[in-house]
Image (cartoon, coloured by chain):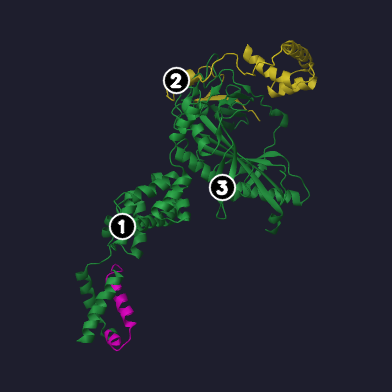
Chain colours: A green, B yellow
Amino acid sequence: MPETKKYETVIGLEVHAQLLTKSKMFCSCPADYIQGSPNSVVCPVCLAMPGVLPVINRRAVEYVIMTGLALNSTISQDTQFHRKNYPYPDLVKGYQISQYDVPIAVGGWLTIDVDGEQKKVGITRVHLEEDVAKLQHIHDAQGESYSLVDVNRAGIPLMETVSEPDMRSPEEARQYLENLRAILQYLGVSTGNMEDGSFRCDANISIRPVNSTELFTRTEIKNMNSFRAVYRALEYEVERQIKVVEEGGRVVQETRGWVEERGVTVSQRTKESAHDYRYFSEPDLPPLSISREWVKEVKAGLPELPGARRDRFVAEYGLSLYDASLLITSKSTADFFENGLRAKDTKPVEVTTKAKAIANWMLGDMTGLLNASGVELGNARITPQGLREFTDLIEAGTINGPAAKAVFEEMFKSGKGAMIIAEEQGLTQISDAGLLDEAVAEVLQRNPQAVQDFLGGKETAVKFLVGQVMKETRGRANPAMISKILLENLGTELNG
Amino acid sequence: MLHWAYPFLDWYVIMTSPRLSQDEVQHIALIYRLGLSQEEIESLRHQLSDILENFQVLDQVDTSGVPPTGHSVALENVMREDVAAPPMSKEDTLANAPLREDNYFRVKAVLD
């Protein structure tokens, strides 16, 4: 793609994350709506009945403060909510309560790795708003079109994080998104689940000639429901915009939707004048003053964040920066690793060996099996304790290399302990000297020619004999022990 | 009725001319998804302009020493603890639905 070099990509992301509060943003309805049947988690406030009064959920504000602090933002002292007006059936009130000129958190940054270097992506703002109702558009057999409204989602606290247009490739955007999600998961403020819509991303993207610092006309990409979709949509859009410009055209400022099945973005042209949100301060909610004491308190209670955890994995467990970075990307993966390592007492000198073994199996076979089966780590049968037991058995020589893969697959499938599987399937390594002595004696007796070759000075004959013992034990013998026993026996014959 | 005045106050600030044009009324109608006849537009143009003119009276008050505020009541930080309470029954929720299909509100198709 030589053409790509003429242009630089400019990407900014807007991420909406539902907050993990117990109740909704402005009323006491339970916020756990996903399991609920349509319109079962609704009250007069969600339904915008006349005379109702919204009241701010303190915890939702706190979650945004936490996020702002984790993103190095400044927490506003005086903030307030605004009404964003637009007529659409997903808004029962006719407006969405959001924030406008004074978001809770302003500025800040998040770091990503670009070619081994740390790069800061600027954060513009983090603000709080309410989610809207869910619509289903129906075209029935009679040719009638209508929509079905489920108000359950309306009023779920929604945190919007807006980045600066600082990302220069779809890969950088993917990293930003992964790191942001990791931060929200570590803070415990959002599930970060893109598939169920708890974590949603819109992208602003433009291209410009390399060395230009101007911002060119951008498009806004919506409807990307997975990390992979974001990456693919942005890649597609870069190519599309380059093609438009190369063919002498101009990129039009518009919203485009990602169509997963076709792998393309398509224009979702709307009447431009229809978007006039007429923001004004929400009269039902008094202004919000965030005291410095509150911010201090929240700051003191922040948990360990992904970056700090990665550095600790390197310093404390001797993992490579690369492995540590992979492990910390998702909190559940990092927890699994650390719980496995801590499942048994470990001598300080053994920590690195044990940690590396667990990390290798997690990042290798386990990731492969998780991806292939589509199972989330949280729902996997294999446990951190089980993995630790397994790597210990390999280290002790109870399970040897070729058998380990098979044992691991079975652990993943059935959740059984490694030792039980190895015994059931006869995969334990034979390190019992008595058993091996017998096998060696048997092999020596059956292969007098090889013994003679060895005694005649042909040292490679030993390899053949080791192979024969392995065959005799169906691959379960401890190879180092066989060599030792064989040489002892042959040595006796040589001397005798 | 104060709430209703707010959007118009916004408009008041935006408008340079106190008399609204037909296009401006049409724009407001589009925003509110109102279908207006020519006569209605003309009649509303005068009524809305009169309202804006009335608000102009407020412009004569010297507010140079008063900090801007979006609220009429001097309250601050009214918040609730994050405690969930049982929602309404589904039947109550859907009781006033003009059209209902299963447990959904049914509405006319609206294209953005």
* Identity of the residue drawn at 66% across and 14% down: B5
Q: Secondary structure at mark 3?
A: helix
Judge from the rendering whether residue A417 lies leftward or rightward of residue A235; answer left or right: left
Q: Earlier in the sequence, mark 1 or mark 3?
A: 3
- Percent position of residue A470, x then y: 30, 72
Do labels 1 and 3 touch, CB within 8 Å?
A: no
Q: Which residue was labeled with disc 2?
A: B89
* Distance from the alpha carbon under mark 2 to that under mark 1: 55 Å
Q: Secondary structure at mark 2?
A: loop
Q: Which residue was labeled with disc 3?
A: A174
Residue A230 magenta-drawn?
no
Give the amino acid at mark 2.
Answer: Ser
Q: Which residue was labeled with disc 1?
A: A392
From the viewer's side, name the closer residue of A430 and A319. Answer: A319
Residue A462 magenta-drawn?
yes
- Looking at the rendering, the stretch of residues picked out in magenta corresponds to A451-477
Estimate how packed mark 1 is, as few (under 14), some (14 to 19) or many (20 or more) residues with alpha carbons within 10 Å: some
What is the chain letter for disc 3?
A
